[in-house]
Amino acid sequence: MLDASLSAQLQQLYRDLPVTIVIRQRPSDHPKQDELTTMLADIAATAPEKIVHRVEGEGAAIPSFEVAVEGRSATILFKGIPGGHEFSSLVLAVLNSAGLGKKPDEGLQGRIRRLKGPVRLRTFVSLSCHNCPEVVQALNQMALIHPDFVHEMVDGGLAESEVEKLGIQGVPTVVSTIHENAQVSVGRAGLVELIDALEERYGAEASEAARDLPAREPYDVVVVGAGPAGASAAIYSVRKGLRTALVAKNVGGQVLETVGIDNLIGTPHTEGKKLAADILAHVRSYPVEILDNRRVEAIENGELKTIRLAGGEVLQAKSLIVATGAQWRELNVAGEKEYIGRGVAFCPHCDGPFYKDKRVVVVGGGNSGIEAAIDLAGICGSVTVVEFMNELKADKVLVDNLKKLPNTEIVLHHRTAEIVGDGSRVTGIKVVDRGTDAEKTIPVDGIFIQIGLVPNSGLVKGLVDVNRFGEIVVDDKCRTSTKGIYAAGDVTTTPYKQIVISMGEGAKAALAAFEDRIHAA
């Protein structure tokens, strides 16, 4: 049953639907069928003249339904009960099917329409996964734009036999049914990343659309990256009267993968998704031109900096601020890439439920690794932490909490040599004692890699100086080695990769760009 508050919100949201939406539920003898029936009936009751709920069609082993405009074939399907984080995917499926809600810009819609069809996708999710809804909602949007595209969300918790058969051990996992359930994407991905993956898998029709793209006058500042540093840089730039564009795959960056945030001064507690939404709202309160769902392909230096985007868009700016952040660091050992989504994972909150009562290893003994190990210990049968150094680097309070748990083990001073599998899934991890060179294989069902982050500096390597870790070298005002190019946040040499520090560094970069502009005038 929807509570009164949520029901009222949906009534407000759906009151102006311009068409009739049909939620067509399939009959099923599954014990969860009544729960789904109640959920869908309650949603339909929020707009009884605009939303119709029917139970009809062929029977299904698992509770299933589809959403479509009355009289049209459905392209958005659900197998399971979209509760938890996925409830928003159902709400938006109704809204978007009616032609409402935010749509991708014309450039992205063009790329979607040019995918070679038919496109048939299924996304396996966990209801505890905070990254899954972004993927489901993006693919649902594509299914409404492309003329021959069908997407189905599958709750892996109910479709256990399918998960087992396909060897899925991480979510979200997108598979193509046309390509024998080949993986298209695993883990968090935004709209532009999914389009890239689908173009690679399905191919795309040639386009001459680039010549029709809007011509933009050069900006005073272009900020690449929209995490805490990039958002801060954009706000401070526009507050100084500079014409500013913010370019990013998604607003929030690495923050989107952070569950609990308790160290942002003035905000005792928030969640990554909430903070990302607040950041976006703050940026939108200023006249910043936000170009999201964009992938930067190349950056060229000159009197004007040139930023080339996938799809043919070209931006120019007098000053460039690079705030591209960082991504999960990989081990770069044999077997790692082969088993991503099939035993190798990076997000314990998303993928932990797949390892209930099973054996897992967490590689990395910093705060992230120990927090992951503690969380997983409540789900898994056993958790082993493998740390490269001879001591754990996490905060003492976390280490103490880990040691209290009866199903955990710590292996120090070992390096990971190989991830072992049987061809379909992980079976073990090979580690080497750094003191004796003794090698052993730990039998394991899953491996969670938590060894820190690697800076996303590839776009400017060769344009600016970077250190041996790939971090962009900056001075105390976020200037790089190249005039007119600034950098801020986790992509730089600035120590202590923290949200609050990135926000400050973004502000410094913008103020430095303004200061240099004034002095050059």
Image: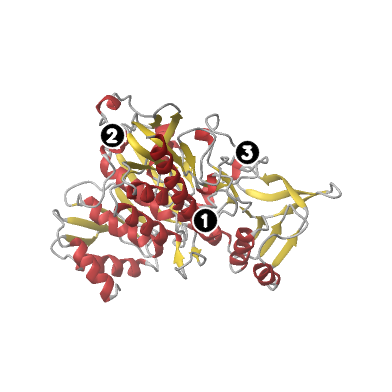
Residue 31 falls in image quadrant: bottom left
Which of the two marks, 3 or 2, is nearer to us in this view?
3
Q: Quick check: can you spot residue 176?
A: no
Q: Nearer the viewer, residue 61 or 218?
A: 218
Q: Which residue is mark 1?
A: 501
Disc 2 secondary structure class: helix
For residue 467, which numbered disc appears in the image?
3
Residue 114 falls in image quadrant: top left
Pinpoint residue 16: horizontal percent, then vertical percent. 14, 59
> As displayed, is residue 467 above or below residue 25?
above
For residue 101, which numbered disc appears in the image?
none
Circles 3 and 2 in contact, beta carbons < 8 Å: no
Which residue is found at the position 54% from the left and 48% from the top? 490
> As displayed, is residue 406 above or below residue 78?
below
Q: Earlier in the sequence, mark 1 or mark 2?
A: 2
Measured Cα–Cα span from mark 1 to mark 2: 38 Å
Circles 1 and 3 in contact, beta carbons < 8 Å: no
Pinpoint residue 491: horizontal percent, then vertical percent. 53, 44
Crowd rating for badge 2 (residues with CA inside 10 Å; few <14, some 14–19, many 20+): some
Q: Which residue is mark 2?
A: 110
